[in-house]
Image (cartoon, rainbow, N blue to C red):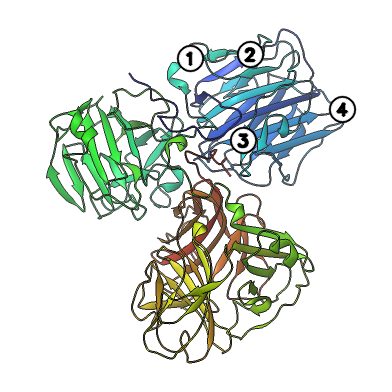
Amino acid sequence: MTHPTVFGGATPPPANYRIANSIRLSGSNYLSRTPSSSGNRQCFTVSTWAKRVPGKRQWILSAADEGYQGGLRLDDSDCVIVGDGQTAIGYNLAQQSKGVFRDPSAWYHIVIAIDTTSQFQAIYINGQIQDSASGAIIPSQGYNTSFNTAGRTAYIGIYNNSGTLSFGYGSCYLADYCLIDGQALAPTNFGKFDANGVWVPIPYTGTYGANGCKLEFKNGSALGTDTSGNGNHWAINGLTAADQMVDTPTNNYCTMNPLDYPPIVGTTYATLTDGNLTMTYTTAYMGSSGKAGTRGTMQMTSGKYYWEVKWVSGSAFGGMAVGVANSQWTGSNGLGMGDAYSWSYDLQGSKYTNSIATAFGAGWVLGDVIGVAFDASIGKIWFSRNGVWQGVSAQTDVENGINPAFLGLTGGMFPAFAGQNNTSSFTLNFGQRPFAYTPPTGFKALCTANLPAVTIPRPASHFNAVLASGASIKSSAEGLCPRFLEWIKDRASANNHQLVDTVRGTSAVLQSNSTGTETTYSAPSGASVGWVWNAGAAAIANTAGSITSQVSANPTAGFSMVTYTGNGATSATVGHGLAAVPKFYVVKSRTQLASWYVYSDVIGPTKRLFLEDNSAASTGPTWNDTNPTSMVFSISGPGVNNNASTYVAYCFAEIPGYSKFGSYVGNGSADGPFVHCGFLPRWVMIKETDTATNWYIWDTSRATSNPMGNTLRANQSNSDVNNTPLDAVSNGFKLRSTQGQAVNDPGNTYIFAAFAEHPFGGANVAPTPAR
């Protein structure tokens, strides 16, 4: 077996501290330790990084026997819970986070600090103290908890329920586990915000106390080794070297994505276990074809990657297939077998795409390991069976880029796997543990350190969302940069949106919920939010189009502000200054009553939307039936080119790791579509194109944890409305709204625009934590 280099030849991301290993807990394996003497039962801290399976209960620490119960856990409700008390009486100490934490694609830093002498208890996630749900129980002063008690066994991974060990909990990964006996510490002892604003681990340099320990999981044969110097080693129970991983908070690895299942409501057709690396199919119904699959957590846009799938149990069935899929694949019709959005090598030895099977290689048998080599830079893929590459004369063909199973696979692909309605299990390996076979030269593990370097390591330098009182929101937002578009909304009151920019003048207001002409800025009366885009350079004349424009452009961030004077022509072009093709832009007359005309590459140049109202996409000549180029956008007719009327346009090109413009199809379920962005979103706007619905806007400044229910509407003056839930996660967003909540009606198409808080990862940045 071969193990990939941790960073696979890539330049490691900047960090002061690198975590080498993690441990994978499956719900039936665990660590245990019985203190020989009591430590401080009133004051202690637990700090660990965790990567989880949402919807499952995972025990970070428990200490209980027949009379006492105490535990810290990631709950099956997706909250973080700490509790302690006597079995016969109930809890004497209890706290539950108000927010939920169900992001499976990255790592959470969790710190629990308890000091009953001062009646202090706190839950911190990624350096931030968490609001408590109702029902918290503050312990009496000096209360002795169940922890650090001589003779009372402590557990990591399971729970002692009145003397009976409770197994069957969900799997998770833990890394850099610290137990501090006798101190209630802040998270800044274990982590910090780096130069890009990302919460990253740092080495703990303090003392551990009598029963304290540090578990780094470095020794595969003794995973419970304490490296604090105290010698407080933990016994391993059911754990083997196969549970030691190199998937860590400083180099996050791909897994399969449980947020990305096909939306089949009320059925359980497959489960992800073992840290989202084992997929087990059942006999339950799985779509009209009986086939279903899911994608990995990472999208491959450039670079060379290798991963493996092993068939570990069950009987053969024709829907088993491994390969890649793009963002349009739903997973409900198998892999390569029901659409043109996926490509696969299947159980019977065929290669599939768009429901067309071609004889290709050997069929699979139980125990086989299927290897996948994908060169995202040139869009080619190869498959192996037990180390023998199929359809080529030798492995050197793969290394030289010839005789691929498929080619032309561009635009960003995800690892994908699909099975069928039989009882079978498969394990996947993206390099977080040793590969069974040596990857072709140049092909690397799929992890954040091997993803392409991002152009914008710190998105807050180019876009941000700021909260302040109405009187100070404008000055607070304008502190980001000298030239900008600033969009201000009173969150507390039904006042108009106000958009100002440094090309038109920062007191000249246009209102997104109105067709009105420019008016004068008026400070909001209530608590407000300001969304600010950095416009880069000062405005200069642009003569690329048939109409000369004034352009303030920030090509690095894919944003420009354009002003021009219409000439009344039925066909005209306007330079936008981006040197890239914009995917989304809006045009508004400054001097006439007129709509905000919206272009989206999803609906194309023959249609338009209107930002100030809720109407569906409609056909019209606005864009002269012509898509934009890297130099100009096209305009035609009244509304965007009246003679002598002045206009402003805000243009956006997509920048990987910073901005995303696209679409999804609703499913009507609270387990809604997952939309991959390649970053943790700071701001998301969604509009349905098929029917009349509002333009909904979320941001992580107004909603600091999931679910994000607070929405503002670009086409309405309403204050914050909390009734349309969405989760912002480390690599995109997940719809949590059901049918009738305007952003997830089944079968309907929605467009979105999103801007980043942090990139998901890349060769030049630390991985973003889970949210």
Which residue is the site of mark 4?
A: 117
Q: What residue type is labelled 2?
A: Arg
Residue 616 visible: no
Q: Nearer the viewer, residue 206 or 513?
A: 206
Q: In this view, does 743 lie to the left or right of 513?
A: left
Which residue is the site of mark 3?
A: 200
- How far across and how far down the image is residue 263, in percent? 40, 52
Specify the quadrant of the image occupied by residue 606: bottom left
Name the residue located 39 percent from the left edge and 66 percent from the top edge: 630
Q: Nearer the viewer, residue 377 or 385?
A: 377
Q: Is residue 33 left or right of residue 747?
A: right
Which residue is the site of mark 2?
A: 33
Residue 752 visible: yes
Which residue is the site of mark 1?
A: 220
Please rate how many residues cluster around mark 2, counting C-alpha atoms within 10 Å: few if below 14, some from 14 to 19, many from 20.
some
Question: Dot 2 lies on which element?
Answer: strand
Question: Dot 4 lies on which element?
Answer: loop
Tag 2–tag 1 contact (CB < 8 Å): no
Precedes in sequence: disc 4 or disc 3: 4
Q: Nearer the viewer, residue 523 or 401?
A: 401
